[in-house]
Amino acid sequence: MFHLSRGLLKLTKSGYSIENYDPTTMALASGRDLRVSFKKTVNVCRAIKGMRLEVAKEFLRGVAQEKIPVAFTKYRKKVGHKRSLGGVSGAAGRYPVLSAKAVLKVLENAENNASKKGLDTSRLVVYHAAAQKAGFIPRVYPRAFGRIDIKHRVLTHVEIGLKQIEE
């Protein structure tokens, strides 16, 4: 008999993977064990990295409403091309709604952390955006002749780092 309590979540260290962190000009936020696709979240994080805060928030809202596609530069096998990505060679894209909503929540949390530190939110840029594989949740998958298989639902960690720039 399979027990769901065995191996439910792996214990992970909850540090940040950011380098050159300066607490006077930067703010961090993380979302741990999110139930979103890891592969789609990697591409969403790649898309917003380097954007200004307001532009990134509008971009993620557009993705969540399926108006703006996210360019899939990694994990793009059998992904169709999107005309609104510019028509360049390899302009594959999708609308990862759940990943965009999850990253938007973490981004808004980082914005709140920055305003709490006293940083100017109009001069913030997404300096660090990363997604990592977290633990997994085992699922029972019924098969023929009374057998079962085990499927794993992979969870995702998301990290966002905002940096105040000089103007």
Image: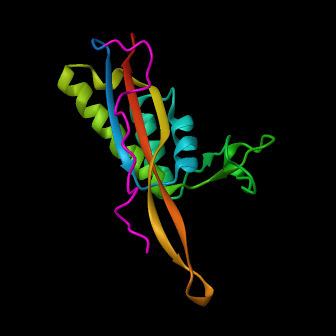
Labels in figure, total: 0
Return the x and y of residue 134 as percentages of the image width and height.
44, 45
Occupied quadrant, residue 113? top left
Q: Is residue 58 above or below residue 120?
A: below
| Bounds of the magenta segment | 1-22
- Measured as percent of width and height from the top left, residue 17 is found at 44, 25
In the rendered image of this protein, does residue 70 appear above or below residue 144?
Answer: above
Q: Is residue 139 magenta?
A: no
Q: Which image quadrant: the C terminus?
A: top left
What percent of the width, then of the height, locates residue 95?
Answer: 57, 55
Of all residues, the one furthest to the bottom in this rendering is: 145
Residue 144 placement, left or right of 13: right
Q: Residue at x 51, y 61 (%)?
A: 152
Side (left or right) of 148 relative to 122: right
User: Splitting the image into 4 quarters, where does residue 56 fall?
Assistant: top left
**From what the image shows, is residue 27 above or below residue 92?**
above
- What main secondary structure does the magenta stretch of the protein show? loop
Judging depth in this view, the residue of 145 and 162 nearest the camera is 145
Work out which residue is located at the far right of the displayed protein and give it: 89
Colour scheme employed for the rendering of this structure: rainbow
In this picture, residue 20 sits left or right of residue 89:
left
* Residue 60 point in image, percent of width and height: 46, 46
Q: Which quarter shows the N terminus?
A: bottom left
Instruction: Let me know if residue 2 is in the magenta part.
Output: yes
In the displayed structure, would residue 67 be above or below residue 74? below
Q: Residue at x 73, y 45 (%)?
A: 91
Say whether residue 117 is left or right of residue 70: left
Q: What residue is shown at x 34% (from left), y 36% (from top)?
A: 30
Q: Quadrant of residue 79?
A: bottom right
